[in-house]
Image (tube, rainbow, N blue to C red):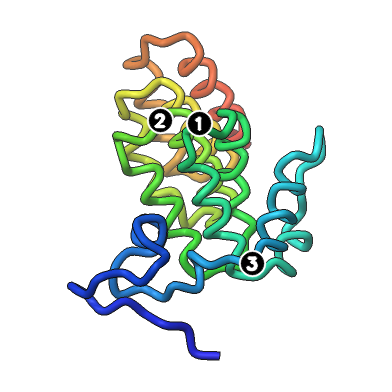
Amino acid sequence: MKMPTVPRGSPLPSLGLTALLLVGPGTSLQAATAPAGVRGEVLSLLDRAGAVPQETEWKPLGPAALSVLEELAADPQMPPQRRSRAVTFMAAVDHPQATDRLQAFLQNGDTQPDLRASAATALGLRVGTGAVPTLLPFLQDRSDPVREAVARALGRLGGAQVQQALEERLPLEEVPGVREALQQGLTFTLP
């Protein structure tokens, strides 16, 4: 089935502002019209106490799961923990744009720091060592939670470049929680 698109400059169909915020002009509306069943499954996976859903549990939900997670993460009415989990679980979603969406969350300085921190964690999980160049500049972010999450994510990824960056940042860091994350990250990178 061919999904309708919104040509640039055209008025939106009845989906309105929500569709624009989720997909933007010129983008497929499939993401903005995720089936209710997918939303219910996503909520169920997010709300599981103590259990982290595996990638195999997200895969059957298909690409529509990403739009649901984005919607939940952007909803200020949602509890903060659910919003952060929604961002983190974008790492496991079967959608080619998930990495780009996580980078956008991380790079947007207007996004809540906890959501940006979750995006840093998720980016490391999703991309692996390929995320190192994207994450490194955020060791100097103005937000403590972001710097902390980036230090931990980089530490898990390891490598000589990461070790050097963490060592260089450690003497400059003044926040105790971030210093601890840098030190932890270094212990992961050392042989």
The correct choice, above or below, for 147 with respect to 12 in the image is above
Q: Secondary structure at mark 3?
A: loop
Label 1 neighbour load within 10 Å: few <14, some 14-19, many 20+: many
The numbered dot on residue 35 is 3
Residue 76 pos. (x, y %): 47, 33
Who is closer to the viewer here, 101 or 18? Answer: 18
Q: In terms of sequence position, does the residue under pointer 2 or pointer 3 come before the other?
A: 3
Who is closer to the viewer here, 189 or 77? Answer: 77
At 81% across and 33% down in the image, what residue appears? 50
The numbered dot on residue 149 is 1
> Three-letter amino acid code at disc 1?
Ala
Question: For the residues marked 1 and 2, what is the alpha-carbon distance in whole angstroms?
Answer: 13 Å
Query: Is residue 85 shown left or right of residue 40?
Result: left
**Does the image show residue 157?**
no
The correct choice, above or below, for 183 with respect to 118 in the image is above
> Three-letter amino acid code at disc 3?
Pro
Residue 99 pos. (x, y %): 47, 59
Residue 62 pos. (x, y %): 65, 70
Residue 3 pos. (x, y %): 47, 83
Who is closer to the viewer here, 62 or 26? Answer: 26
Furthest residue in direction left, as rendered: 9
